[in-house]
Amino acid sequence: FRDYENANNERHRLVEELYHQQHVHQTFEFVKKTREEYGKLEKGEMSIWECCEVLNDIVDDSDPDLDEPQIMHLLRTAEAIRKDYPNEDWLHLTALIHDLGKILIHPNFGGLPQWAVVGDTYPVGCGFSETIVHHKHFRENPDYKNPEYNTKFGVYSEGCGLNNVMMTWGHDDYMYLVAKENGTTLPSAGLFIIRYHSFYPLHKGEAYRYLMNDEDRENLKWLNIFNKYDLYSKSKVPINVEEVKPYYQSLIEKYFPAKLKW
C-alpha cells in the first residue's frame, strides 16, 4: 500500500500531480484564510450518517490504492478496530468519521480541488521536512524561500504543541473543526486522530517531533494503533452496511448532537 514510486500508470501520475499542486499552493497565508472561512461552519446542517452517505459519491485521487466508495473503507476500518479493541467505542466511531471532511470536494461544500482536501498533511509556517512525499515540488512554493517560514521552527517554538501549529488545509483539519465546534464528547485522542491521521511525515517519517508536547506524545500512541487499521483495511472484505448501522448510530448519539453544522 501507499506505493508512490511506481509512476508508470495513470493513477500514479494523478497522485503525483495532486502533490505538485498541493506543494505549490498550500502556503501559510492560504491555510490561514481557508481555515477561517470554513471555521464559520456555514455550509449546511446534517447528521453524521447523512454525511457518510454524501461521501459515497467521492473518490480520493491522492490514494494510489483505493478506488471504491469511501463508506466501505470507513466501515471496514471501524469494524476491524472494533474486533480488536471492543471496549474502546470512541475509537470505533473515530474510525467511522475520520474521513468525513472529504465532503469538501462536493459542490455543496465549496467543491474544493483535491489538493486542498486530500493527501498527506504537514505544518505550514516552518521548513518543509525532507520526509514529505514528492518534496521536490516545494521549490515552487513562495514560503520555501521566505525566511520567516523556511527555518526549522519558523513561526513556532520547540514543544509548542501541535494544537498551536497550522497544518495544510484538508479533510483532516475540517472534520476536526466540525467535531470540536459542534461540541463532540470524543476524548482528546479521538480528535487527535481525526486531525493528524494524514500527517505521515510525523507518524511514518518521525519528522516535526520537536513541535509536540506531552499530550501529543500520549495521543500519538493511539494514532499509531489507528493507522495500522486505516492503511490495511483496504482489502475488499464485504461489509453489510444495514447490519452494522444501528451500532454506529448509537455511538453517534452518544458522542455527537443529532444535527451538526458543517
Image (cartoon, grey):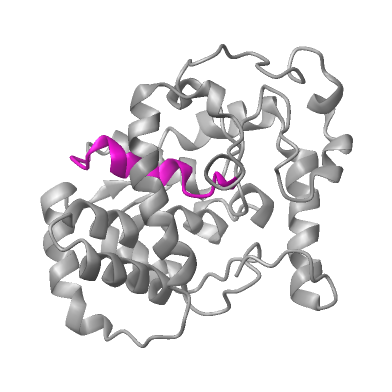
Does residue 192 belong to the magenta stretch? yes
Eyeballing the image, is 213 above or below 15?
Answer: above
Residue positioned 40% across, 64% down in the render: 229
User: Can residue 262 be seen?
Assistant: no
Residue positioned 76% across, 70% down in the render: 12
* Residue 25 or residue 159, whichever sits in front: 159
Eyeballing the image, is 54 above or below 94?
Answer: below
Residue 224: x and y, percent?
41, 49
Does residue 13 appear left or right of residue 233 in this picture? right
Magenta segment, which residues? 184-200
Residue positioned 48% across, 46% down in the render: 172
Does residue 224 appear left or right of residue 113 in this picture? left
Question: How many numbered circles are shown?
Answer: 0
Say which quadrant the N terminus sits in: bottom right
Specify the quadrant of the image occupied by residue 15. Answer: bottom right
Residue 230: x and y, percent?
43, 63
Specify the quadrant of the image occupied by residue 201. Answer: top right
User: Can residue 73 be seen?
Assistant: yes
Residue 260: x and y, percent?
27, 48
Specify the quadrant of the image occupied by residue 73. Answer: bottom left
* Residue 208 or residue 256, whichever sits in front: 208
Residue positioned 86% across, 44% down in the render: 136
